[in-house]
Amino acid sequence: MLRHYLETKAEHPDAILLYRMGDFFELFFDDAVEAAPILEVTLTARQKGTPSEAPMAGVPHHAIDAYIGKLLRAGYKVAICDQVEDPKQAKGLVRREVTRIVTPGTISEPELLDGKEENLLAAIVWNDDTGAGAMLDVSTGVFFVRRWPSESQARDELAVIRPREVLHFGDLPTALDEWMRRDVTSHTEIDDADRLDNRRATELLCEHFACATLRGFGIDDHEPAARAAATALDYAQRTPHSDLEHVTSLSVRDLSDVAVLDATTLTNLEVFRNLREGGRRGTLIGVVDRTVTSPGGRLLRDWLRRPSRALEPIRDRHEAVAELVNDDPGREHIRQLLGGVGDPERLLARAVLGTMSPREAVALRSALRVAPDLLDAVAGRPSVLLREIAGSDVCAALARELDRVLAEDPGSLADGGVIADGVDPELDHNRSLARDAKKHMLAFEAREREATGISSLKIRYNKVFGYYLEVTKANQDRVPEHYIRKQTLVNAERYITPEIKELEEEVLGAEETQLRLEAEHFARLLVTITDHGAQLSKLARAFAHLDVLTGLADVAVKYAWSRPKMTEAGEPLIIEDGRHPVVEHTSTEPFVPNETELDGDEAQIVVLTGPNMGGKSTYLRQVALIVLLAQAGSFVPAKHASIGVVDRIFTRVGASDDLARGDSTFMVEMIETANILHHATEHSLVVLDEVGRGTATFDGLSLAWAIVEYLHDTRRGRALFATHYHELTELADSRRGVQNYSVAVREWQ
C-alpha cells in the first residue's frame, strides 16, 4: 500500500495527497507533518518506533470537503486518491486512483466558495517591459484577459482583482513578484514541460472555442494575452479533468469605459472591507448589497469595483432603478421570485464538471420554474435594461427535461430515488422489485417468528454478511436445525438460511440495477444541461442584473436616496445636502448634510480646513463614495447631485505603514501620493487627507503646497485636499481654481 502511495505521490509532488483507506483519507510522510496542524488533527505514525516509521494523519471521508477547504485556504493544492473498486470484490490491494485535483483557483464546490465573490485563477505572461494576464473563474465560466504596459499597472490591477491562484512563467518583475508573494497564498511557476509556445497556445484556444482565429475575440493569435489565456485554460482543464464546456467566450477587458479605482482607493474608502478587522460591517457594500442571489452579489461587486465612465450605460441603470423605485409592489414581487433562483451560473459549471448532485439539479429546476414569472414581472416596462431582461430565453426545453427526468424530491445517487417514475420501464421494474422484495423480507421475518415462536427474532443487514436473522441468547433453545450460525455476539447469535439468501439476491440485485440505471439517466441529464449552457449562462446573467437593479432600488427607497444627474466628463460636480452612505447608517447620531461644488475652473481644488476630529476625512470619503455610487448605477445619498463623470478616483486618506516591506508611514504616504500625481488626469477626482503630516512641519507644509500647485497647474483634475496646514489657504490668492472651505463644529444642549 505504501509503495502505491509513494508512486501516486511522485505523480503529484506539488499537491497534498489524501489517500483513501477504508472510512478515512490518510496523509503520510511530509504531507502529514505539514498538513496536520492546518487540519487540526493528531500526527501519529505507521510502524512507529521502527526504521520504517511513516508519519501519518487521517480525516474521516464523510467530512472530506471541510478538510479540503482548510488546505485550500492555506494555499495548498490537493489531490484526492480514492478507491475505484468495491473492496468486497477486490483481490489483493483495492484499486485506487486520483479522482480529483483541487486547487484554490479551480474549485467549484459550493461549500468551498463564497457565493458573492469571484474565484479567479490568473495566468501571467511577461515579456521585457510589458505583459498580459488571463483571469478564469472555473465556477462560473467567466474568462477575460488584460494587457499591461507596465509592471506597476499590472500589480495595481491584480491587487484589485485578487485572484485566488496565480500561474506564471519564470521570473516576474520586482513589483509583481513582491505583490504575489505577499498577497497570493497559492502561486505556481509553469515549468518548461508544461509551457505553451505561441503556436500551441493559439491551437488550444481555437480548438476550445471552435474558431479559426482569435481575432474575433480582439486578440492576435500570437500575442502574450493568447499565451496567458491558453495557460489558464489548459491548467484548469487538467485539474478537474474537464473540457470546461461552460467557458464559452473570452473577452478583452478594456479600461476605457470604466472608472479606475486602485486597491488603495478601495481600501481607503472601505468599499468591500473595513479598516479595522477586514469584515463587511461598516463598508459601502454592507450598506448597498440588498441582492438576494449569489450571481447578483457578484455582479454588484463588479459594478462597484469597475464603475462605468460611459454615460449611456450609467443612465440606463439609473432609469431601470427609477422604474423599480416607483413600483413598490412590483419590486417586492420580483425580490420574492428571485429568492428561488439560486446560482444557475455555478450550477451549470457543476454539471459540466460532472460533479452536480441531484439536489443541485433540483435547485436548477427551481430556478427555471421561476424564470417565466420573473421575466413576466418586468415585461412591458420602458427601461432599456428591463426590456432586455424580459426578452431573455427561459430555457423551456431544459426546464421540461428536468421536470420529466428528476423526481420531485430526489434522494442521493448512492441511495436511489433520483429519477422520476415513468422515465424508464426497466428502472421502474427494478425499483418496484427492490421495494417489494423488502416487503417479502419483512413477511419472511413474520413467518419465522410464528414458526419458531421467537417474538424478538429480527432480520438485519450489514456489509459483511448481508441479510441475516438475529436471535437473543435467551431464545437459543428454539432455533431450528436448518439455521446456519454465522456470528456469536454477547447477547445474541446471527444466522442465515437458504431462503433469506435467495431473497437477499433479489433485493440487492434489484437495488444494484436500480442505482446503475439512475446514475446513467442522471449522467445523461448533466449532458443535456451542458448542451444548454449558452442559454443558461445568459439567463443567469439576466437574473443577476435584475437582482442588482431591484436591490439598488430597495436601497434608494429605504434610505431616501435620489437619482443623480449624470453629465459629460469635465462638467461640474455639484452635491446638495450630501450624506456619507455608511456613517449615516452606522452612527447613533444624526448625520448633518453638506454641500460640494467642484469644477474645472474656479472651484477645481477645495482646500478644506477645520478642527481635528471635526469630520474632514468623513466629508472627503463621502464625496468620493457618492461619485462611485452614481457611476456604478446607484441612486445617491443626497437631495440633489449633478455629476460630471470621472475617469479615476484617487484617495490618500489616513496614516498607515507597511513594515513588512520596510516602509514607514511617511514613505507609504509619499508612494501613494506619487502614484496619484503620475496618473491623475483633468477628468479624475482626487481626495487627499492631511498629506505631509508624517514628517517635520515645514517639510510637510512644503510638500502639501507643491502637491496642490501641481494638481492645479499640471494635472488639472478636481480635488479635495483636507489639511491642518492653514497656510495653504493662501493658495486661493495665487491660484484661480483653488477654493477654501472649512468644517464648522457647533455643540449645543
Image (tube, rainbow, N blue to C red):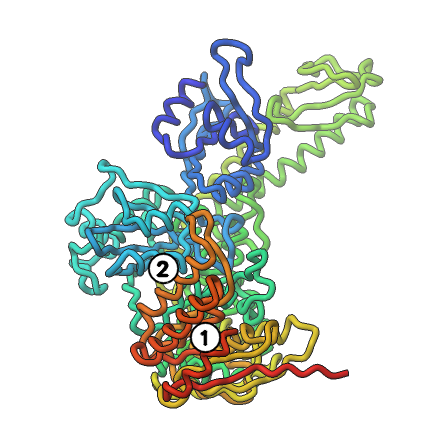
Q: Vertical placement of 498 versus 390: above or below?
A: above
- The front one of 84 and 26 is 26
Residue underneath mark 1: 628
Q: On the rendered structure, is 699 left or right of 208?
A: right
- The front one of 125 and 313 is 125
Q: Quadrant of the C terminus?
A: bottom right
Residue displayed at 49% across by 39% down: 71
Q: On the rendered structure, is 506 left or right of 14?
A: right
- The kind of residue tagged 1 is Leu
Q: Quadrant of the N terminus?
A: top left
Foreground tag (1 vs 2): 2
Q: Vertical placement of 653 versus 376: above or below?
A: above
Residue underneath mark 2: 156
- The front one of 611 and 674 is 611
Q: On the rendered structure, is 42 left or right of 18?
A: right
Q: Splitting the image into 4 quarters, where does residue 540 fall?
A: bottom left
Q: Label 2: state its secondary structure.
A: helix
- The kind of residue tagged 2 is Asp
Residue 338 image offset from top left, x and y in percent: 54, 69
Q: Splitting the image into 4 quarters, where does residue 631 fall?
A: bottom left
Q: Extreme top residue here?
A: 50
Q: Extreme right residue here?
A: 474
Tag 1 and tag 2, C-beta contact below 8 Å? no
Q: Label 1: state its secondary structure.
A: helix
How far, Cα to Cα, is label 1 from label 2? 18 Å
Residue 410 image offset from top left, x and y in percent: 57, 50
